[in-house]
């Protein structure tokens, strides 16, 4: 009985999905050259801000790594 209920539920779900899959037409985009230039400029700003952030994070990791190395040397003396 339980398998038959599961099969009926699956049939109902798949039957309702077919109408959504049959939707036609793609969304038309009327973006001109200036919109793409603006988006490129925004991406350039984001990348330009990420470069110093990554360099700072690498510097912090390097400093932490060096500080642990110094502590190990001091304890061994």
Image: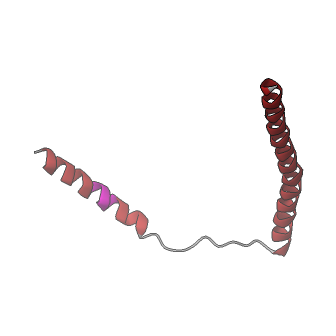
What sort of colour scheme is used for the picture? secondary structure
Q: Is residue 62 left or right of residue 2?
A: right
| Residue at the limit of the structure toward the left, as seen here | 1
Q: Is residue 13 left or right of residue 45?
A: left
| Residue at the limit of the structure toward the front, as seen here | 77
Q: Please tell me whether residue 62 is drawn above or below residue 19 in the rendered image.
A: above
Q: Please tell me whether residue 23 is drawn above or below residue 50 in the rendered image.
A: below
Give the residue displayed 33% in from the left and 59% down from the top: 16
Q: Is residue 22 left or right of residue 62?
A: left
Task: Provide the residue span drawn in magenta.
Answer: 12-16
Closer-to-camera residue (23/34): 34
Give the residue displayed 84% in from the left and 40% down from the top: 60
Residue 3 is inside the magenta segment: no
Q: Quarter of the image containing the C terminus?
A: top right
User: Where residue 37 sits: x, y (%)?
Assistant: 86, 69
Give the residue displayed 73% in from the left and 73% down from the top: 30
Closer-to-camera residue (9/74): 74
Q: Quarter of the image containing the N terminus?
A: top left
Closer-to-camera residue (70/23): 70
Would you say the magenta stretch is mainly helix, strand or loop? helix
Quarter of the image where one finds residue 36: bottom right
User: Where residue 53 sits: x, y (%)?
Assistant: 85, 47
User: Where residue 67 sits: x, y (%)?
Assistant: 83, 33
Q: Please tell me whether residue 44 is drawn above or below residue 53 in the rendered image.
A: below
Q: Please tell me whether residue 73 is drawn above or below residue 15 in the rendered image.
A: above
Give the residue displayed 82% in from the left and 44% down from the top: 57
User: Where residue 21 sits: x, y (%)?
Assistant: 42, 67
């Amino acid at each position: 009985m339980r398998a038959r209920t599961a099969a009926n539920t699956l049939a109902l779900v798949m039957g309702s999905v077919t109408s959504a899959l049959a939707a036609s037409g793609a969304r038309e985009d009327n973006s001109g050259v200036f919109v793409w230039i603006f988006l490129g400029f925004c991406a350039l700003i984001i990348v330009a801000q990420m470069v110093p952030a990554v360099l700072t994070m690498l510097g912090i990791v390097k400093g932490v790594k060096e500080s642990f190395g110094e502590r190990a040397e001091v304890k061994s003396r």
